[in-house]
């Protein structure tokens, strides 16, 4: 009998939620065939079978959250004699190591995070506290030493929440804990729907908390006059083109900032993260090399990524490493906003609902279509002058006739 455990899915994640099984007990499955779909804070990941054989047990159901290294499924493996489980496990692990597409699968149980063997190795080669990458970066920014911190994750893994709790004043933690304990009970008694944040919403909460604690946010607002546009213009494609023009004018907004090393990284390419609203929460797929795409190519890529985001089929690599962000909230409602900068990026543009405004033009009154613009930036690394120069260049491009 072979027990397959949830492999490391990357991204510094310690758990995943079972979305759906593609097999049931008694089914036969071939090696590398899709076995189940799991949902992480980043994307939906298809986990392939590490062996060819027959499914004998499932250790999780859709909706269950399981940690990396936890038992997931059991097989009877083809070609392995019954009653020889040791050989079956060894075969499955070696297959998983060489063939899995979702990450590294330790070859033995004692190589999982928190195991004695791994901790002993780390004691010799890397004597530091075990923490998810985002938690380690947050601790560096806040000047917190992780050495004495006990993590709440699996095997003592330090999470973002652990770092935030350590950073908060003791009285604030006490007050927050007391407040958090009572409202859900009262709400449940009143018949309210109390929901635990999962996947995208949990990831959004963590990202927004990280931004709140680590970004000196500032916003400026203006409008672009679209009077010269022809009917039927592609608003999103024009905005993306204008973003590249603005970033050529002010490279400092097409950047990442590392507070720990007090350095910024300036990019020549423009990778725009597009905030997409889905029923499950916010996803930010990335349009790569916007500066190289014409209007039809931009529209095709926008349509593809929006559909993939809403169907939860967007790939993990399409959700990482944006150099600038765009929130097109005006397609639904709203004129101005204060969009939230997500580190390590330093700027985000929000476009509001386009509407007609009454303007005074050459001593006469005219109706012009105008697009409200809201630019938020990290004032630690972007000056007010850089921000408004970017916005001015972007507006100048938007106001051109096609």
Image (cartoon, rainbow, N blue to C red):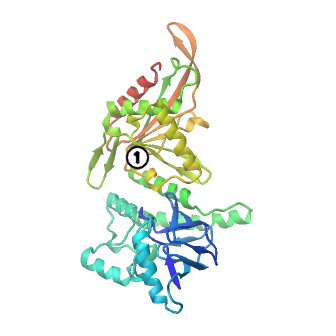
Residue 175 seen in render: no
Vertical relation: 62 (above or below) 364:
below
Judging depth in this view, the residue of 210 and 89 nearest the camera is 89
Seen as rendered, the residue at the extreme bottom is: 83
Total labels: the figure holds 1
Vertical relation: 249 (above or below) 205:
above
Q: Which residue is mark 1?
A: 322
List x then y, in percent, for residue 372. Answer: 52, 29
Q: Secondary structure at mark 1?
A: loop
Residue name at image x 43 percent, y 69 percent: 99
List x then y, in percent, for residue 336. Answer: 53, 34
Residue 101 seen in render: yes
The answer to whether residue 355 is left or right of residue 301 is: right
Q: In the rendered image, which quarter is residue 354 located in?
A: top right
List x then y, in percent, for residue 56. Answer: 60, 81
Residue name at image x 34 percent, y 40 percent: 269
Judging depth in this view, the residue of 233 and 102 nearest the camera is 102
Density class for disc 1 (Cα within 10 Å; few <14, some 14-19, many ≥20) is: many
Seen as rendered, the residue at the extreme top is: 363
Judging depth in this view, the residue of 67 and 149 nearest the camera is 67
List x then y, in percent, for residue 106. Answer: 40, 76
The answer to whether residue 50 is left or right of residue 107 is: right
The answer to whether residue 151 is left or right of residue 266 is: right
Vertical relation: 256 (above or below) 250:
below
Residue name at image x 34 percent, y 74 percent: 148
Vertical relation: 239 (above or below) 6:
above
Seen as rendered, the residue at the extreme right is: 191
């Amino acid at each position: 009998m072979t027990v397959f455990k949830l492999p490391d899915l990357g991204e510094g994640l310690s758990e995943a939620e079972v979305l759906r099984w593609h097999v049931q007990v008694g089914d036969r499955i071939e090696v590398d065939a899709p076995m189940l779909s799991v949902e992480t804070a980043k994307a939906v990941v298809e986990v392939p079978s590490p062996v060819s054989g027959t499914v004998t047990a499932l250790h999780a159901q859709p909706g269950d959250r399981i940690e990396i290294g936890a038992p997931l499924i059991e097989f009877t493996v083809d070609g392995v004699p019954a009653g020889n489980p040791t050989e079956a496990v060894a075969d499955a692990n070696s297959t998983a190591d060489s063939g899995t597409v979702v990450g590294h699968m330790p070859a033995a149980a004692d190589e999982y995070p928190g195991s004695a063997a791994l901790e002993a190795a780390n004691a010799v080669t890397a004597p530091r506290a075990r923490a998810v990458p985002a938690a380690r970066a947050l601790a560096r920014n806040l000047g917190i030493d992780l050495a004495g911190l006990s993590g709440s994750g699996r095997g003592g893994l330090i999470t973002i929440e652990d770092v935030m709790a350590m950073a908060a004043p003791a009285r604030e933690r006490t007050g927050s804990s007391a407040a958090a304990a009572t409202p859900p009970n009262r709400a449940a008694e009143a018949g309210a729907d109390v929901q635990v944040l999962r996947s995208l919403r949990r990831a959004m909460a963590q990202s927004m908390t990280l931004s709140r604690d680590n970004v000196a946010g500032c916003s400026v607002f203006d409008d672009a006059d679209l009077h010269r546009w022809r009917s039927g213009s592609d608003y999103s494609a024009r905005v993306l083109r204008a973003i590249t023009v603005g970033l050529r004018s002010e490279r400092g907004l097409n950047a990442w900032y590392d507070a720990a090393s007090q350095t910024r990284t300036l990019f020549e390419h423009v990778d725009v993260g597009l905030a997409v609203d889905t029923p499950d929460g916010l996803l930010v797929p990335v349009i790569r090399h916007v500066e190289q795409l014409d209007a039809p190519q931009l529209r095709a890529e926008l349509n593809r990524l929006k559909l993939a985001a809403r169907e939860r089929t967007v790939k993990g690599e399409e959700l990482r490493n944006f150099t600038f962000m765009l929130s097109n909230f005006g397609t639904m409602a709203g004129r101005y906003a204060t969009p939230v900068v997500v580190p390590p990026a330093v700027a985000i543009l929000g476009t509001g609902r386009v509407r007609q405004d009454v303007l005074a033009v050459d001593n006469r009154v005219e109706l012009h279509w105008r697009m409200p613009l809201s630019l938020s930036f990290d004032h630690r690394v972007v000056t007010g002058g850089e921000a408004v120069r970017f916005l001015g260049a972007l507006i100048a491009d938007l106001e051109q006739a096609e």
